Amino acid sequence: MTMIRRFWLEAAAVLIVAGSLFRSFTVEADVVQGDVQRIMYVHVPSAWLAFLAFVVTMIGSVAWLRTRNRRWDRLAASSAEIGVVFTGLAILAGMIWARPVWGQFWTWEPRLVTTALLFFVYLGYLALRRAVVDPVQRAQRAAIMGIVAAVQIPIVYYSVNWWRSLHQASSRNSIDTPLRITLLLGVLAFTFVYAVLLRRRLELAHLEEELEARRFEASPDVAGAGITAPSLAKANKHD
Amino acid sequence: MIDLVAAQVDNAWWYVTVAYIVILGGMAAFVAWLGFRTRRARRELEQLS
């Protein structure tokens, strides 16, 4: 019973992902692109998951600035990491799809460029978190970046409408029902995957926070000393 | 136009398979990495306590 309570979300995610994959391979092929269009059923949900993760990062950042509760900082950091992974995966799947339909893996068109920028900015967010030792300063700087970086989400989303180029515009309203159902099932499956990953990543964030506190208790002089400003007084102590 | 695109994508299943392997493999690798980091953090916590 405890196992069911602990792993129900994982079990639900596995089932719905399996159902989504089955549907992706069995639904009829697109009339224009043929079977290669099936890549859409993992490419779009990956991008959706990344957007969702970055919105949660923004919510966590705003909530941390308002409450100063560490729980929100953990949420923002955990969600950003998942978002970066899935932005990378969406880009890779998109490149594989682009090769047969555009004739090349990569082109400097607005949707691709803004998505790549989104990926690198959130990679910078994760790098910033690793660069600051003080937990409060880290949370504060990351929260500000988490809010500012979220400006890119609508830019990436609407880039296909604002600057018409190679990437197709949103086909949400024009897509045929069987294909739309398959896509929505994929989106639902990836939302479950996000919930599972977030739960796991939050557990890790909690452990890392505890570990950081224990390390500081064990040797308060050493913790963070590597990045403090050089001091003559300290240097002279060794003379 | 339809014939042109369809002709280009005669090995479509190869691309589809690679894309699915990338996404599902990436997902599995991330889960494994999270598991590894969690185990390592637990081990270090045990050593410190």
Image (cartoon, coloured by chain):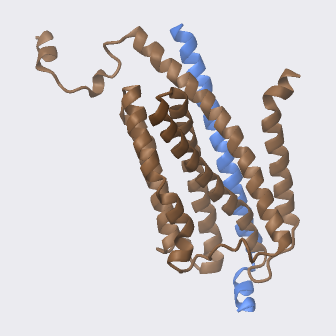
Q: Colour of chain B?
A: blue
Residue at the image position 85 percent from the left and 45 percent from the top: A15
Relative image position of residue A197 (x, y in whole percent): 67, 39
| Residue A169 drawn above or below residue A125 | below
How many numbered marks have been drawn onto this rendered protein structure? 0
Relative image position of residue B31 (x, y in whole percent): 66, 39
Q: Is any atom of residue A184 visible in this view?
A: yes
Apparent side of residue B16 relative to residue B34 in the rendered image (left or right)? right
| Viewer-proximal residue among B8 and A78 | A78
Q: Quadrant of the N terminus of chain A?
A: top right
Relative image position of residue A31 (x, y in whole percent): 80, 82
In the picture, one chain is brown; tell me its letter: A
Relative image position of residue A100 (x, y in whole percent): 65, 77
Residue at the image position 77 percent from the left and 63 percent from the top: A183
Apparent side of residue A132 relative to residue A11 in the rendered image (left or right)? left
Q: Is any atom of residue A127 visible in this view?
A: no
Residue at the image position 65 percent from the left and 72 percent from the top: A170
Residue at the image position 61 percent from the left and 59 percent from the top: A90
